[in-house]
């Protein structure tokens, strides 16, 4: 059995820049250029005093036969976040399909038919779509959203229908955690056609939204502020083997039976991954899966999985 290493809590690191104080006479002699430089250093110090917390939000998790060539939705940020990737499911398996992702600030409603204001952030002419049982991950999105702001997304793939579920009301809040809110969207049959017949709403995309949370720290505060108010912080630690994309997990609320979180896609082999989630106080079970069926230990390298909860 390989040696298992113990991982402690995530350390929110900060960098403090210190300046020596001169004598009073010398301090009084500083000119405006010195004061400007000092203010710039203080500003830089505050910018450096932040930590990145990887997190994710499960969207609709039910496997259904509904889908279309495109899907639109918007999210609301409860803090400063950066969307890094989106996991989606498709109705069919396609070896090489074009996939595009567009984004725009605010809510998409009223802008479904025009490309104006949308920015293309992902354009893969030949992506392998993995079907209904395995999520297809769109990586490298890098969309920053400021606290209290809304951001819309439009995913388009004409070769493999993107799965979604019927919703209740377009624009209604569907799921959320301490960092982000996900709202019911629409299915799209044509790309920026300006035809109402090409829009089907409400629809809820099936997948996972992965993002980084920017946690700022006050230099005068010795301890970081609570990052999970009103809930319980759960950290999932996974050390991958030589086939990281085969490893996945599901966190289930045993009190309600609802799926609370779904693992992100692991791409880096022999790497320690730590993801933190804010969940309601309850009993939970976590189920680890291996796509190939031979487990993550140990012929393919030293590895382990562990759940740490607060």
Image: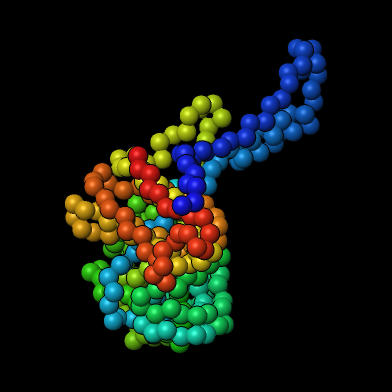
Q: Is residue 45 visible?
A: yes
User: What residue sits 23% from the left and 69% below the top?
Assistant: 168
Q: Is residue 11 above or below residue 143?
A: above
Asked if residue 141 can be seen in this view, the reply is no
**Residue 224 picture location, percent across and down:** 47, 33
Q: Residue at x 69, y 34 (%)?
A: 41
Relative image position of residue 128 (x, y in whole percent) = 50, 80
Q: Is residue 111 above or below residue 182?
A: below
Nearer the observer, 119 or 228: 228
In the image, residue 170 above or below residue 47: below
- The spot of residue 92 in percent (x, y) is 39, 85
Closest to the observer, 140 or 108: 140
On screen, residue 212 versus residue 188, left or right, reads: right
Image quadrant holding the C terminus, namely top left
> What coloring was used for the rendering?
rainbow
Q: Position of residue 72 (x, y in %)?
A: 40, 72
Instruction: Name the residue at the front extreme.
Output: 1
Is 193 placed left or right of 27 in the picture? left
- Residue at 26 percent of width and 74 percent of height: 166
* Residue at 56% over, 37% down: 13
Give the left or right position of residue 304, taking residue 47 as reference.
left
Quarter-of-image position of residue 174: bottom left
Q: Residue furthest left?
A: 255
């Amino acid at each position: 059995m390989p040696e298992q290493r113990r991982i402690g809590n995530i350390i929110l690191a900060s960098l403090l820049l210190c300046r020596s104080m001169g004598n009073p006479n010398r301090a009084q002699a500083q000119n405006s250029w010195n004061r400007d430089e000092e203010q710039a250093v203080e500003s830089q110090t505050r910018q450096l005093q932040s930590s990145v917390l990887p997190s994710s939000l499960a969207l609709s998790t039910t496997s259904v036969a509904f889908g279309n060539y495109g899907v639109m939705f918007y999210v609301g940020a409860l803090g400063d976040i950066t969307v890094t990737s989106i996991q989606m499911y498709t109705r069919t398996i396609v070896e090489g399909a074009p996939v595009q992702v567009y984004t725009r600030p605010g809510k998409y409603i009223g802008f479904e038919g025009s490309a104006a204001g949308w920015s293309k952030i992902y354009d893969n002419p030949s992506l392998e779509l993995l079907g209904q049982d395995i999520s297809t991950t769109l990586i490298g999105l890098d969309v920053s959203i400021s606290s209290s702001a809304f951001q819309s997304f439009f995913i388009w793939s004409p070769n493999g229908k993107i799965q979604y579920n019927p919703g209740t009301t377009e624009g209604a809040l569907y799921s959320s955690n301490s960092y982000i809110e996900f709202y019911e969207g629409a299915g799209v049959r044509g790309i920026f056609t300006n035809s109402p017949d090409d829009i089907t709403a409400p629809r809820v995309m099936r997948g996972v939204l992965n993002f980084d949370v920017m946690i700022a720290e006050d230099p005068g505060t010795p301890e970081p502020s609570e990052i999970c108010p009103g809930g319980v912080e759960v950290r999932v630690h996974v050390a991958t083997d030589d086939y990281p994309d085969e490893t996945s997990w599901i966190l289930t609320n045993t009190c309600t039976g609802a799926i609370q979180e779904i693992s992100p896609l692991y791409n880096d082999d022999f790497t320690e991954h730590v993801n933190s989630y804010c969940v309601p106080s309850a009993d939970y079970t976590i189920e680890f899966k291996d796509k190939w069926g031979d487990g993550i230990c140990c012929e393919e390298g030293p590895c382990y999985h562990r759940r740490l909860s607060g």
